Amino acid sequence: MTDDDARAAGVAARLHDVRRRIADAERAAGRRPGSVRLLLATKTVPAALVRAAVGAGVDLIGENRVQELVAKGPELAGLPVEIHLIGHLQSNKVNPALRWASCVQSVDSPEIAARLAERSTGAGRVLDVLIQVNVSGEETKFGVLPAAATDVAAGVAMLPGLRLRGFMTIGPNSPDQGAVRAGYARLRELRDAVVGSGEAGTPEATELSMGMSGDLELAIAEGATIVRIGAAVFGTRQQ
Ligand SMILES: *Cc1c(COP(=O)(O)O)cnc(C)c1O
């Protein structure tokens, strides 16, 4: 077995474990089996290994940086996998992001939403977007603050060229499970308020992208529809 084969086999084995964790968490929360989608966070992971994960049944990946999207995109083109952007997007990188991503989960300001809408409309497309909310208010994190989230969502939902599909958050970086869970509950409450608002373009904003390798069970208990997993499948990153 080559090193590459060994790494691919390791990824397949760890994927199996993660899928079991997701299924167990769905069951524990009384949720329908299959109601939570697995997104693999593939930052710093070489395209060959991403291809191996797709071979093992992964149909959704997320990249943080547009530069990496552009580098790996051609090697992933044609594979049965959806690619989402899950990292902060700068306005001068909107075009390459649109080229390679079918959804931007990291819309974190009205300005970037407007730019995406303009370019998406110009390309004759409708781009799926999630609004990233900084539920914990940590200064190091991107995302709109919870107090502004419903207004931002109503504005984004009205933009042409975008389809508001829901909300994303990066959980508080804390060993306090209660605090982490409260952050995820906050995102669910915001989602429920927006979907229930009756505003144009909001009924489809049902997705909750939350939960990572260390806390996916808490996120699923609070209603996550997408969990974003990196380290549990690819090992701990060096950077
Ligand atoms: C890296 C990353 C993840 C995955 O985190 P792990 O702890 O490696 O599972 C999820 N979401 C975002 C935005 C990330 O950058």
Image: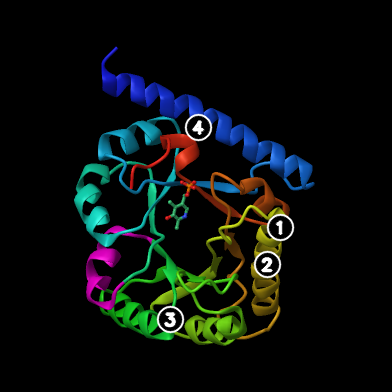
Mark 2 or 3, nearer chain start: 3
Q: Is residue 35 shown left or right of residue 155?
A: right
Whether the residue under disc 3 has CB within 8 Å of ligand 1: no
Q: Residue 123 carries which label?
A: none
Look at the numbered disc 4 and give the secondary structure of its residue: helix
Mark 1 or 2, nearer chain start: 2
Mark 4 Cα shell of 10 Å, populated few (<14), some (14-19), many (≥20): many
Q: Residue 222 carries which label?
A: 1
Mark 1 or 3, nearer chain start: 3
The foreground one among 167 and 237 is 237
Mark 4 or 3, nearer chain start: 4
Residue in the image at 62% along x and 86% along y = 199
Look at label 2 and name its amino acid. Arg
Quarter-of-image position of residue 193:
bottom right
Image quarter hosting the N terminus: top left
Look at label 4 and name its amino acid. Leu
Look at the numbered disc 1 and give the secondary structure of its residue: loop
**Segment colored magenta:** 90-102
Mark 3 Cα shell of 10 Å, populated few (<14), some (14-19), many (≥20): some
Residue at the disc numbered 4: 15
Residue in the image at 71% along x and 72% along y = 189
Q: Residue furthest front?
A: 175
